Image (cartoon, rainbow, N blue to C red):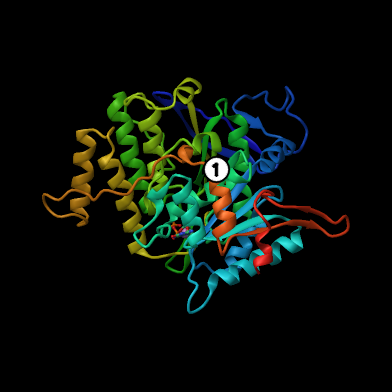
């Protein structure tokens, strides 16, 4: 991939936020970078062989809730071969068992493509027990199961990525219509990690366009409404500390993003759809130098955030206006209540939410649920309980028929395929 180097970067304590970088060439060849390649300095060649090295060390988590199977199948086809696929589903099981259909789709794909994967249902009592016994009971609801929500699905995926020994984890939504976009996101994740100088890094995707049908024509929208609002307030927070106006953050709501596990396991995540914008906020809270940081090693090495603008359009399932409203609200709620938020930002958020009719006069935005970092989890216990108690967890082995070679993502956990 040939990729622009960031023109600008801004600092917030130990966090470096790089400005949006454009992709110049989707595949820039496998030759190692030479002096010629990077002679212009502003554009960087990341060899496909280097990208592949990162893919081997990466898990891709696909959170899914009731998406169309054809679309899901397309998403799977776009995930580069050497990434481990982790499907975390919160789809309905009754009266129609959509989880079973997703399992069949994944199995068939893996068999034909000779790949390994993992899948689990979010409301499986076994995954709940694993969290409870290994030290993170906060993720459970009163009914004793893991709460509904995209953030919770991502945390399950993160735990499985950790157990599989992968070093990087990327997230890709299951409702993406363009398999080529999925492929490009993963290449961008790998390129970002390659450019990172710190082991604590995050790569977020900014899309060039989000096509919509308007008046019977295809219109390539630059930004979604919800993104505009989230980014505006995140930038406002930065400028209230630095004293300089900024537009550096363009990916507050990015559903497509990736972390080094070294970073992800130290961070706190938010519930539901507050999850993505809160990642910025939590990194600022922990490593922004405003509050005392719990992780001295991270403060020393710094955190790097890359924002990469991909070439493919972001074309996903349209879930209607209510959903956008809800997401925007949750992003602002977490910013409002953050201990690093300042009065000016709080006032502007409250004014905005009142104007939009989301909260009434004198009302405060609601608090969102925040989870502790996963660094407190006892992973041996987690794996053992998961293996013993889960009903839906499956590991699909990579099987190469001619050589009879088999690979299981987590060999220590007994082959749950035998459960059917
Ligand atoms: P948007 O694209 O950000 O507007 O949000 P979507 O509704 O498309 O959700 C993003 C992804 O998360 C999709 O793949 C959904 O199917 C999935 N998703 C939504 N809610 C949940 C949930 O509760 N659990 C899991 N595991 N996935 C979810
Ligand atoms: Co979507």
Give percent across and percent down for residue 367.
Answer: 26, 48
Give percent across and percent down for residue 25.
Answer: 66, 41
Q: Residue at x 62, y 24 (%)?
A: 41
Q: How many numbered tags mark residues here?
A: 1
- The quadrant the N terminus occupies is top right
Query: Given the current orientation, which residue lies at the most extreme bottom position?
Result: 95
**SS class of the residue under badge 1?**
helix
Answer with the quarter of the image where residue 27 lies: top right
Q: Residue at x 88, y 55 (%)?
A: 403
- The answer to whether residue 15 is left or right of residue 178 is left
Q: In terms of depth relative to the viewer, which is nearer, 39 or 231?
A: 231
Query: Can residue 164 be seen in this snapshot?
Result: yes
- The answer to whether residue 383 is left or right of residue 90 is right
- The quadrant the C terminus occupies is bottom right
Q: Is residue 223 above or below residue 88?
A: above
- The answer to whether residue 45 is left or right of residue 270 is right
Q: Is residue 127 above or below residue 165?
A: below
Give percent across and percent down for residue 3.
Answer: 61, 35
Query: Can residue 220 be seen in this snapshot?
Result: no
Q: Is residue 329 above or below residue 236?
A: below
Q: In terms of depth relative to the viewer, which is nearer, 330 or 146?
A: 146
Q: Within 8 Å: ligand 1 and the Cβ of disc 1?
A: no
Query: Given the current orientation, which residue lies at the most extreme top position?
Result: 300
Q: Residue at x 68, y 34 (%)?
A: 46
Give percent across and percent down for residue 359.
Answer: 19, 54
List the residue tagged with mark 1.
379
């Amino acid at each position: 991939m040939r990729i622009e180097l960031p023109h600008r970067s801004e600092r917030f304590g130990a966090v470096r936020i790089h400005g949006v970088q454009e992709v110049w060439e989707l595949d820039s060849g496998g030759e190692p970078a030479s002096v010629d390649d990077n002679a212009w300095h502003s554009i960087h060649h990341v060899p496909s062989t280097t990208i592949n090295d990162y893919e081997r060390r990466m898990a891709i988590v696909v959170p899914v809730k009731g998406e169309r199977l054809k679309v899901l199948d397309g998403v799977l086809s776009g995930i580069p071969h050497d990434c481990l696929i982790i499907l975390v589903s919160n789809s309905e099981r009754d009266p129609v068992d959509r989880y079973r259909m997703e399992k069949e789709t994944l199995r068939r794909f893996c068999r034909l493509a000779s790949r390994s994967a993992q899948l689990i249902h979010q409301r499986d009592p076994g995954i709940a027990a694993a969290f409870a016994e290994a030290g993170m009971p906060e993720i459970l609801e009163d009914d004793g199961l893991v709460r509904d929500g995209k953030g919770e699905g991502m945390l399950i995926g993160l735990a499985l990525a950790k157990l599989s020994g992968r070093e990087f984890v990327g997230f890709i939504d299951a409702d993406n219509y363009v398999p080529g976009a999925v492929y490009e996101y993963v290449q961008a994740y790998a390129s970002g990690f390659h450019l990172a100088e710190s082991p604590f890094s995050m790569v977020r995707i900014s899309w060039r366009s989000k096509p919509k049908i308007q008046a019977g024509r295809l219109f390539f929208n630059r930004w979604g409404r919800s993104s505009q609002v989230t980014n505006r307030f995140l930038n406002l927070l930065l400028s209230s500390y630095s004293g300089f106006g900024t537009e550096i953050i363009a990916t507050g709501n990015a559903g497509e993003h990736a972390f080094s596990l070294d970073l992800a396991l130290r961070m706190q995540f938010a519930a539901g759809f507050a999850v993505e914008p809160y990642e910025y906020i939590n990194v600022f809270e922990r490593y922004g130098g405003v509050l005392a940081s719990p992780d001295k090693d991270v403060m020393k090495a710094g955190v790097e955030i890359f924002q990469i603008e991909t070439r493919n359009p972001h074309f996903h399932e349209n879930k209607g206006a209510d959903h956008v409203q809800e997401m925007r609200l949750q992003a602002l709620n977490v910013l409002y209540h953050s201990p690093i938020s300042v009065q000016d930002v709080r006032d502007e958020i409250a004014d905005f939410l009142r104007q939009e009719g989301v909260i009434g006069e004198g009302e405060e935005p609601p608090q969102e649920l925040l989870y502790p970092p996963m660094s407190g989890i006892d992973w041996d216990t987690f794996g053992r309980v998961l293996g013993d108690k889960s009903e839906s967890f499956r590991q699909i082995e990579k099987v190469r028929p001619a050589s009879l070679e088999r690979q299981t993502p987590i060999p220590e956990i007994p082959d749950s395929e035998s459960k059917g």
